[in-house]
Image (tube, rainbow, N blue to C red):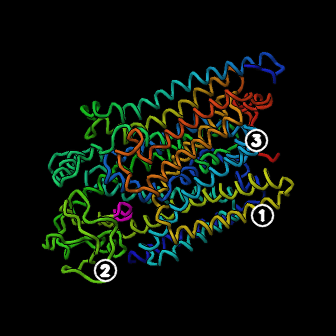
C-alpha cells in the first residue's frame, strides 16, 4: 500500500499499524456476531434445543433473545477496545467535536 | 372517561407535543436541515435512531408475525438488530469521518463520478418509497380502528403532522421529535407487555416471562403449553419453524445487511459531532431498539395463547367485544362451516384469500363472507396478523388508558419513520440531484427551499400511496431490505475497506445487484405469483432472502470489473486513508 499522501513517515506507519489492528479486532468480533446469530440461532439450533434455559430451548433462546444481547455487548466492547488502540497510535478524536 | 375519549386525549396530546418541538427546533440552514448541524449528542441520536428505525412494521406487525410464525419469526428479530453491529463496526464511524450530508454524497465522491451518485440516488429513492408506503398503511389502520375516522382522513391528518415538523424542522426538527416519539412508543409497547406477562406467568418482565411457567397451576412452561395447544389444533410446534434452514439463513442475512444499507438509518450517523460518537450512537440505538425487540417475542407468544383461549370453541354470540370490533374493520372474519354457532380455530385457511363481506348478517349475527370456503381445513376463523399488538390490550382486558396509549404509540412509530424517510428523499433530490449534479450554482437559500419543496412533494406522493395502496405495495415493503443489501451496502463497504475499488466496478456492481434482486422479486410477486413456491426458487431461497444472492453478485461483478479497469486516482487513495482514522472529523460542510 502506498503512503504517498503523508510526509510524516512515522505518522503513516502508525496509521497502517492502526488499520491492521482494527481489521484483526473486526474479524474477531464479526466471527462472534456470526456464531451467536447464524451459528447458535440457525445452523446449530436443532442440536442446541436439547438443552434448555428456564423454559426456553437453548437454540430458540439464542434466536429470539440471546443473539440480541450479544450484539449490544459487541458494539460496546468494540468502542472500548478500538478507543484503546486509537490512543496507543495517537489517532483518537477525544479533543474534537463539542459533545 | 370512556376509552374513546382517552384515545382522542392521548393522541391529541402527543401530536401537540410533536408540533411544539418542531416549532422550537426550526432549521435555519441546509446543514441543520440535512444533518441537524452535526451537533447531536450520541445518546440522544441513538434514541432518535431507534424511533426512526422502529416503524409501524416493528410496532404493529412484528409481534403478530412472530405469534403466527413461531421460531420462523426469529428472522426479523435477529435480522433487524444484527444489522446495527455491521453499522457500528463497518460503516458508521467511517461515513461520519467522511463528513457529508447524504449516502449518494459518499458514493459520488469516493467513486469520483456523477454517474455513481445518480445510480445511488435511484437506489435510494426506490428503497425509501417502497418503505414509506408501508408506514402510511400503518397510520391508516390505527386511525380507522381507534379514531373512527375514514382511512383517507386519517392519512391526511398524519401527513399534515409530518409536514409541519419535517418540512419546517428538517433533520433538526425530526431528531428532537423522534426522541419524544421513542418515549411514547416504548412506553406504549412495554406497559401492556408487563400486564400480559404478569397475568400469564406471574412474572412482570416479559423477557423472563416467556421462559417461565404458566401460572394456571399446570406446571408447564409457556413455550411447552403453546407447543401442546398448537399441535392439538393441527399447527406445527411453536418452537419449530416451517421455513427451510437455508431460507431462514438468507432472509436473516438479507435483513441484517439491508438494515446496514438503509439510507435513512445511515444518515442518522451524520448528525453526531465526531467519528467515535457514531459508534457510540449505534450502540445506544441498539439498546433502545432491543428493549422492544426482546419484548416482541414474548408479546407474540402471549397474544397467541390469549387469542386461542378466548376464541377457540367459543360461541359467536358470546364472542368478546374486540373480536366483533375488528370484524367490523374487515380484519377478522368467521365462517360457520359446520353450522354449530361455535368458532373453531384450527390450522389452515378458513377460506380463500382476504375476506370479502356481503351486506348481510349470518345465522349467529356474524358478517357473512362470500369467499370460497376451503374443504381441506376445519378452520373457521380468519385473522389478520397485523391486529395482534393493537388488539392485545383488549384481548387481555386491560384498562382503557392502556388501549389509548397503544394507539398513540402506533402512530408515533409510523410517523417517526415516515418523517425520516421523507427527509432522505428530499435531501437526495435537493442536494444530490440539484446542488451536486444539475445546478451546482444554486444558493444555500435556494437549496433549502428546494429541500422543503421536495419534502412536500414526497409527502403528497406518500399520502397518495397510503390512501390508494396499490396491491403490491404492502407486499414489497419487506423487499426494501433486499434491495438495500444488494445495491448500496456493497458499494459503501468496498469504498471503505478496499482502496482498489474504482468507479467502473462500483457502478457495475450496484446495477447488477439491484437489477437481479428487483427482477427476482418482481417475477415471483408481480408477474408469476402462482409460481412463488419453494420448488421454483433459486436454491430454495424465497424472494425475501434473495438480496443475499444479489449482494454476492454485486461483490463479484464489482471486483471482476475493477480488476479489468484502471486504479482509482491518487486523491481517492488519500481520501480512503483519511476516513479510516477517527482524528480530524469536521462539522459537515458544503464543498
Whether residue B271 is visible to the viewer of this picture, yes or no, is no
Rounded to the nearest whole Å, what is the CA distance between mark 2 and mark 1?
A: 50 Å
Structural distance between the alpha carbons of marks 1 and 3: 26 Å
Q: Earlier in the sequence, mark 1 or mark 3?
A: 3
Q: Position of residue B424 (x, y in %)?
A: 65, 54
Parent chain of label 3: B
Q: Quadrant of residue A62?
A: top left
Q: Earlier in the sequence, mark 2 or mark 1?
A: 2
User: What element does badge 1 sit on?
Assistant: helix
B389 falls in the magenta region: yes
Judging from the image, what secondary structure is the residue with disc 3 in? loop
Dominant SS in magenta? helix
Image quadrant where residue B200 sits = bottom left
Q: Between residue B479 and residue B444, name the one nearer to us.
A: B479
**Placement of the N terminus of chain B among the 4 image quadrants:** bottom left
Residue, disc 2: B358
Cα separation between marks 3 and 2: 58 Å
Chain identity of mark 2: B
Nearer-the-camera pick, A91 or B386 = B386
Q: Which residue is depicted at the point 61% across and 67% down?
A: B461
Q: Is residue B528 left or right of residue B580?
A: left
Circle number at residue B449: 1
**Image: magenta residue range:** B384-392
Picture disc at residue A22: none
Of the image marks 3 and 2, the number of the one nearer the N terminus: 3
Amino acid at each position: 500500500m502506498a503512503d504517498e499522501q503523508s510526509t510524516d513517515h512515522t505518522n503513516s506507519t502508525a496509521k497502517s499499524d492502526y488499520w491492521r489492528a482494527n481489521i484483526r479486532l473486526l474479524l474477531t468480533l464479526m466471527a462472534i456476531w456470526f456464531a451467536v446469530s447464524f451459528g447458535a440461532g440457525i445452523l446449530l439450533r436443532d442440536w442446541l434445543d436439547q438443552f434448555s434455559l428456564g423454559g426456553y430451548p437453548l437454540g430458540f433462546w439464542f434466536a429470539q433473545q440471546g443473539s440480541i444481547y450479544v450484539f449490544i455487548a459487541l458494539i460496546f466492547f468494540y468502542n472500548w477496545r478500538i478507543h484503546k488502540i486509537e490512543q496507543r497510535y495517537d489517532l483518537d478524536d477525544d479533543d474534537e467535536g463539542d459533545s | 372517561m370512556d376509552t374513546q375519549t382517552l384515545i382522542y386525549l392521548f393522541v391529541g396530546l402527543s401530536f401537540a407535543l410533536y408540533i411544539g418541538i418542531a416549532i422550537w427546533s426550526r432549521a435555519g440552514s441546509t446543514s441543520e436541515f440535512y444533518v441537524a448541524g452535526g451537533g447531536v449528542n450520541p445518546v440522544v441520536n441513538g434514541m432518535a435512531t431507534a424511533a426512526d428505525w422502529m416503524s409501524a412494521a416493528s410496532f404493529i406487525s412484528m409481534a403478530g408475525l412472530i405469534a403466527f410464525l413461531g421460531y420462523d419469526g426469529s428472522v426479523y428479530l435477529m435480522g433487524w438488530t444484527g444489522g446495527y453491529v455491521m453499522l457500528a463496526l463497518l460503516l458508521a464511524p467511517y461515513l461520519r469521518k467522511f463528513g457529508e450530508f447524504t449516502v449518494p454524497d459518499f458514493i459520488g465522491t469516493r467513486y469520483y463520478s456523477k454517474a455513481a451518485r445518480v445510480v445511488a440516488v435511484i437506489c435510494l429513492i426506490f428503497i425509501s418509497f417502497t418503505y414509506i408506503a408501508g408506514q402510511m398503511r400503518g397510520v391508516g389502520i390505527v386511525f380507522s380502528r381507534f379514531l373512527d375516522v375514514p382511512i383517507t382522513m386519517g392519512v391526511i391528518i398524519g401527513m399534515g403532522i409530518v409536514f409541519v415538523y419535517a418540512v419546517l424542522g428538517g433533520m433538526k426538527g425530526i431528531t428532537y421529535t423522534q426522541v419524544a416519539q421513542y418515549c411514547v412508543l416504548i412506553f406504549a409497547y412495554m406497559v401492556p407487555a408487563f400486564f400480559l406477562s404478569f397475568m400469564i406467568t406471574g412474572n412482570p418482565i416479559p423477557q423472563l416471562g416467556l421462559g417461565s411457567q404458566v401460572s394456571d397451576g399446570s406446571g408447564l412452561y409457556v413455550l411447552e403449553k403453546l407447543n401442546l395447544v398448537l399441535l392439538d389444533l393441527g399447527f406445527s410446534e411453536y418452537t419449530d419453524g416451517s421455513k427451510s434452514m437455508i431460507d431462514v439463513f438468507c432472509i436473516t442475512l438479507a435483513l441484517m445487511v439491508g438494515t446496514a444499507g438503509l439510507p435513512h438509518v445511515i444518515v442518522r450517523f451524520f448528525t453526531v459531532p465526531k467519528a467515535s460518537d457514531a459508534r457510540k450512537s449505534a450502540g445506544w440505538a441498539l439498546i433502545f431498539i432491543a428493549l422492544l425487540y426482546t419484548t416482541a417475542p414474548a408479546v407474540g407468544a402471549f397474544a397467541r395463547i390469549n387469542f386461542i383461549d378466548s376464541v377457540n370453541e367459543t360461541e359467536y354470540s358470546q364472542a368478546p367485544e374486540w373480536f366483533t370490533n375488528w370484524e367490523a374493520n374487515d380484519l377478522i372474519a368467521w365462517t360457520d362451516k359446520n353450522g354449530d354457532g361455535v368458532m373453531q380455530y384450527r390450522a389452515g385457511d378458513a377460506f380463500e384469500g382476504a375476506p370479502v363481506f356481503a351486506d348481510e348478517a349470518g345465522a349467529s349475527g356474524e358478517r357473512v363472507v362470500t369467499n370460497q370456503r376451503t374443504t381441506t381445513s376445519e378452520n373457521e376463523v380468519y385473522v389478520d396478523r397485523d391486529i395482534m399488538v393493537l388488539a392485545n390490550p383488549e384481548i387481555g382486558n386491560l384498562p382503557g388508558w392502556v388501549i389509548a396509549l397503544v394507539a398513540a404509540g402506533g402512530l408515533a412509530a409510523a410517523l417517526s419513520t415516515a418523517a425520516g424517510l421523507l427527509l432522505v428523499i428530499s435531501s437526495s433530490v435537493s442536494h444530490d440531484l440539484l446542488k451536486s449534479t444539475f445546478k451546482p450554482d444554486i444558493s444555500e437559500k435556494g437549496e433549502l427551499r428546494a429541500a422543503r419543496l421536495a419534502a412536500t412533494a414526497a409527502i403528497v406522493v406518500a399520502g397518495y400511496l397510503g390512501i390508494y395502496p396499490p396491491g403490491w405495495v404492502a407486499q414489497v415493503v419487506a423487499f426494501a431490505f433486499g434491495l438495500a443489501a444488494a445495491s448500496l451496502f456493497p458499494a459503501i463497504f468496498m469504498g471503505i475497506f478496499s482502496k482498489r475499488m474504482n468507479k467502473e466496478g462500483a457502478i457495475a456492481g450496484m446495477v447488477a445487484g439491484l437489477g437481479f434482486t428487483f427482477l427476482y422479486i418482481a417475477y415471483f410477486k408481480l408477474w408469476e405469483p402462482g409460481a412463488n413456491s419453494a420448488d421454483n426458487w433459486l436454491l430454495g431461497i424465497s424472494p425475501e432472502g434473495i438480496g443475499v444472492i444479489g449482494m454476492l453478485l454485486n461483490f463479484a461483478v464489482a471486483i471482476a470489473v475493477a480488476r479489468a479497469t484502471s486504479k482509482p486516482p491518487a486523491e481517492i487513495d488519500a481520501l480512503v486513508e483519511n476516513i479510516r482514522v477517527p482524528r480530524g472529523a469536521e462539522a459537515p460542510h458544503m464543498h
